Image (tube, rainbow, N blue to C red):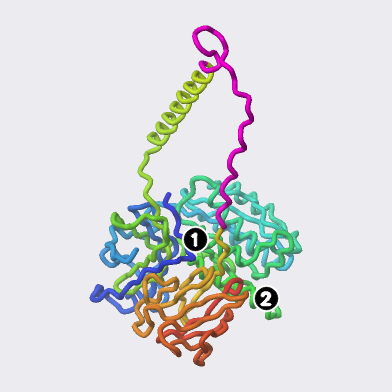
Amino acid sequence: MGRPLGNCAKTLVSVAVLAGFAVAVPAAAQQPTVVKLQQVFVDLPSIKVYMDVLDANGKPVPSLVAADFKAAVADRWLPVKSVTQFQSTGQGVAYAVLIDTSLSISMKRFEEIRAAVALWIDRLGANDRMALLRVGTKPEFAQRFTASHSDLIAALNGLKQNSDRTALYASLVAAMDSYQTAGALPERRAIVVLTDGVDDDDTTGRTSDDVLKKINDSRVPIYAIGITAVPPTPSADQSLKTLAELAALSNGLYLPLGRALIADLYEEIRQVILRVYVGSLSCDSCPHDGRPYGFKMVARGVGSDVEQIILLPPDKQEPWDKELRVWIILALVVVLASLVIGWFLKRRKGPETGILPIIDLSPVPDPLPPFPPSPSRPPGIPIVFAVVGKQKKYQAELVDRIVVGRGSLCAISIPGDDSVAEHHCEIFQRDGLLYIRDLDKPGATSINGAPMGPNQKLQSGDKIRLGGTDFHILVGASK
């Protein structure tokens, strides 16, 4: 299995619109208008991407082939070797389904959830796997990943509403962790949750920041259905807003329940998960230095958001080769230990006369003190630049300062806007506060509709304008 993509990057790739990359289509409605990356797996030189391609009506674009796509990675364009519909590959999906067992969900809703999940279990394919996780006072698996329909139904029927708290964030973290410990699972993965979004956990201490960090590490899409509180309250609305943002940042999907049937929304999510294209490409010339690089897919001239992938050295060793190397190393250790023991016994025996040598009993000087430990890197602050009116986002981690501009080496790189300078502005922290200042020329950046000062304070939710683009800034827990 390949290595999943990372996030919180220090380097973004600059990509340009590919001129002339278009293919005639029968109708305008079938022309791609959105390319959404859902998962990317890297095992150099191979890169595999799961992506959703939609038209202007939000419908999936059919019949795309490899010639319709190009990919940009590490500052270079790459051809796509193959593109197939996921459902035609025979691959399975590993679903982690979270079920809210708190008393904040009505009994009627709870029974509707169980009935909808039972229907989903009945539709699982032979290569699919599913886990059921109870969301209550603390996360608890009712059933680990399995292909057994009967085991899943038995676990589902055993769920009861018996929790007065909802550890939602801890449960999302536990679901993402479960993919790392479950052994062999399908590459296509999805976390599905229906909840009112409220996290009133007073036991685990997990927060939305913990979920965001885990998203950056594991990159498993979250597909969430939100139940609006009746009557609505500001805190409940904010909880659902945070859940929607987490789903978007994971490359998943958020759907409000509204007046729809729960079973219908579960089926809509299932179809979104299954309808994706699987693209394969090869990058023999890609650097593999463990650094994050920007990655983008283009379908008939329409590009996805820039995502981050970690390019690690390929592992060429076959399993038998690895095992042989282990045995060789063990044999060398045994031989070396035998030589050391023999040399020591020979010294103790002394010359051939059989007289033991004189042993120096003078005190041994104390060993030199160890080198002081290297200072650890302080934790950074997640910063998200969300384009106003679009789903596009740029992300970075602020430790001391981050530079924003058009240049590919900027922490936040904004390609395609010539009105943005190569190094446009920077964000830095001082005495626990965030500031932003221009690097190109004074007044090149405005904040909340007004020109900003030399060192302007910055808060989460502020609206800034760089060149011809407006962004909302999301900082830390505000994401």
Q: Amino acid at mark 1?
A: Arg
- Residue 176 in view (yes/no): yes
Measuring from the top left, give residue 384's x and y in whole percent.
Answer: 51, 74
Dividing the picture into quadrants, the one containing residue 300 is bottom left
Q: Which residue is mark 2?
A: 236
218 vs 102, left or right, is left
Give the SS element for disc 2: helix
Q: Amino acid at mark 2?
A: Ala
What's the residue at 39%, 63% (across, down)? 293
Instruction: Find residue 312 and name its label.
Output: none
* 370 in the magenta segment: yes
Q: Which residue is mark 1?
A: 219
Dividing the picture into quadrants, the one containing residue 122 is bottom right
Q: In the rendered image, which quarter contains the C terminus? A: bottom right
What's the residue at 51%, 68% (across, down)? 397
Measuring from the top left, give residue 245's x and y in whole percent.
Answer: 55, 72
134 vs 379, left or right, is right
Relative to the observer, which residue lies in front, 165 or 460?
A: 460
Tell me which segment is drawn in magenta: 346-375
Residue 367 versus residue 4 in the image, above or below: above
Measuring from the top left, give residue 424's x and y in whole percent.
Answer: 42, 81
